[in-house]
Amino acid sequence: KGDRSAALMQYQACVRALDEELGVKPEAETILLFDRIRDGVPLPERSTHTVAAPTAPLIGRERDLARLGRRLADPDVRLITIVGLGGIGKTSLAREAGGQFSHDFTDGAIFVSLVTAVEPSDVFPAIAAAAGLRLEPSSSPLTQVGNYLRSRELLLILDNFEHLTAGASLLIDLMAAAPRLVLLVTSRQRLGLSVEWLYELRGLDFPAENATHPLAEFAALQLFARRVRQERGNFALVSSEALAAADICRLVQGMPLAIELAAAAAGVRSTAEIARQLHVGLDALAVEWADLPLRHRSLQALIDWSYDLLSPVEQRLLRRLSVFAGGFTLEAAEMI
């Protein structure tokens, strides 16, 4: 509740300065604000954005959340990229972080899915849609989104950025326009920006073959057990069932999506049968869940999607590297 007359005088002074120095008019949002103040219309309360909670509790990511929380609290950090394989849990972790840490930002957090974005220029309309901002044709989406975010202290989560990295420099423009904005991005590859702080996400903890700790203490086994109980409620991590479940989690290296796909087969197969099939190939990992994107309904579809994101040169290199049955050194790779 400020001085209304002073606000109106300041607006007129700004209009003159913009016209004389830059030859431009105020943005539509600024003009609307002036009209409201002039007419004595109460200004709307500025809403605090929130991120919807994940549909299921996140398992085994407590350390990752704590580390991300420390990064987000660092005033020198304005762009964090969670990098990792497809299906490793980047989206789930980012959503959980948005829910847990939104209260650390005056204006909360906004989650933006970029799955349907085709070009880097699609990023700003996607942000506007998630923020509830209606874009006008009179100025660029970047300008309007920048104006909207300029005075806000906000955590902006951009999910699935890997196919848009050619336009990653647009994020620099966005941060310049909104000095109190912090970006949390998920991608299968780094953005290649000097201001970027990387956070590499790996699979859930899983037991080695000679593990001495109780199997139920490993996050990968906990996720598998929870998902199997959705198929048949009497599942418990005991005896041979637990050993087969541990084998499955080792085979997929703790990848959450692969664990969930394997557990989904528990309604028609025993845990031991699922493990035996995985030793042969990945075809057993497939579901028809309508709430999963097509690329996440089978491990093969996920691999195909990831392969298609590579350039022709990268695809050719990957095919050549497939001659190695296990790991390889840089020197060995250079030989092919």
Image (cartoon, grey):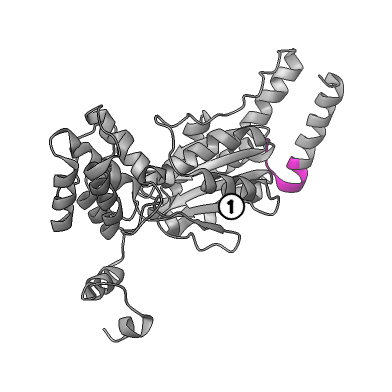
Residue 173 in magenta stretch: no
Please state the horizontal and vertical placement of residue 274, each as a whole percent of the image: 17, 46
What range is drawn magenta here?
Answer: 18-26
Q: Does the magenta stretch include residue 24?
A: yes
- Name above or below for residue 30 compared with residue 320: above
Estimate the x, y position of residue 253 in percent, counting from the top left.
Answer: 32, 56
* Residue density around tag 1, few if under 14, some if 14–19, many if 20 or more, within 10 Å: many
Residue closest to the eye, 304 or 176: 304
Q: Residue at x 83, y 19 (%)?
A: 4
On the rendered structure, is 18 left or right of 213?
right
Which type of secondary structure does the marked residue at label 1 adopt? strand
Q: Which amino acid does label 1 sit on?
A: Leu
Residue 292 seen by the camera: yes
Residue 139 vs residue 307: left or right?
Answer: right
Residue toward you, 162 or 255: 255
Judge whether 213 appears above or below 25 on screen: below
**Residue 135 visible here:** no
Picture quarter with the N terminus: top right
Describe residue 184's horizontal placement relative to residue 335 as left or right: right
Does 200 sit left or right of 206 as displayed? right
Q: Which residue does the image show at 19% across and 46% down from the upper left?
A: 285
Residue 2 drawn above or below residue 155: above
Q: Quadrant of the C terminus?
A: bottom left
- Residue 159 placed where, x, y %? 44, 44
Pick the front one: 197 or 100: 100
User: Which residue lies at the image location 47% right of the left edge and 60% below the top edge?
Assistant: 190
**Residue on which the image places disc 1:** 79
Instruction: Residue 52: give x, y in percent of width and height.
Output: 48, 29
